[in-house]
Image (tube, rainbow, N blue to C red):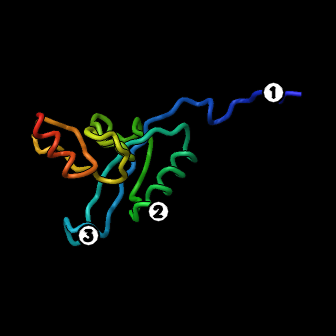
Amino acid sequence: MKAKKTASDSDLPAEKWLVAFRNPSSKKGPAGSTMVRQFFAPGYYEAYDTVLSHAEKMKLEVLWFREKRNCGQYMNRNYPSLEGKCTWCNRKFDGEGVPCSHEACEFDFCSRECMMEHAKKH
């Protein structure tokens, strides 16, 4: 006998979330560096799990996370994805990617080598 289908989190549309991390081991300053990333999750608990899993894996501190539509000053900007994909080689990478050296280009890369290959063609 099949169970009756009920509404669950998998039936909810994915909402865009923002998370702010602090990387205490970064050499960008005495307090480390901060970054904002975006990702999709259908609800609070899935977002919470995604954020804490990523923070633990990358050894980052979570400053805050919330639905993008409730972020006021952060709402009208695009942020890098929580897990990026290299524009050049299509490998997934965690954390901060290497940004393109051209000012008008917004691509991120998994390594400086991929960024240099892209720059040759750009």
Q: Horizontal placement of 117 versus 79: left or right?
A: left
Which type of secondary structure does the marked residue at label 1 adopt? loop
* Quarter placement of the N terminus: top right
Question: Where does residue 4 sit, x and y in percent of width and height?
Answer: 81, 27
Q: Earlier in the sequence, mark 2 or mark 1?
A: 1
* Quarter placement of the C terminus: top left
Crowding at label 2, few (<14), some or many (≥20) Cα neighbours within 10 Å? few
Please determine whether, in this image, residue 66 is positioned above or below residue 7.
below
Please name the residue that numbered disc 2 is placed on.
56
Find residue 4 and name its label: 1
Please determine whether, in this image, residue 69 is positioned above or below residue 93.
above
Q: Earlier in the sequence, mark 2 or mark 3?
A: 3
- Marks 2 and 1, how far apart at CA: 37 Å
Which amino acid lies under the numbered mark 2 shown in the image of this protein? Glu
Residue at the right extreme of this rendering: 1
Could you tell me which residue is drawn at 50 percent across and 50 percent down? Answer: 50
Which amino acid lies under the numbered mark 1 shown in the image of this protein? Lys
Q: Looking at this view, is 6 or 73 the one in front?
A: 6
Question: Where does residue 90 sit, x and y in percent of width and height?
Answer: 33, 39
Please determine whether, in this image, residue 46 is positioned above or below residue 121.
below
Which amino acid lies under the numbered mark 3 shown in the image of this protein? Ala
Which type of secondary structure does the marked residue at label 3 adopt? loop
> Could you say which quadrant of the image residue 100 lies in?
top left
> Could you say which quadrant of the image residue 66 lies in?
top left
Please name the residue that numbered disc 3 is placed on.
31
Question: Where does residue 22 sit, x and y in percent of width and height?
Answer: 33, 61
Question: Where does residue 59 sit, x and y in percent of width and height?
Answer: 40, 65
Could you tell me which residue is drawn at 29 percent across and 53 percent down? Answer: 96
> Could you say which quadrant of the image residue 91 lies in?
top left
Could you tell me which residue is drawn at 43 percent across and 50 percent down? Answer: 65
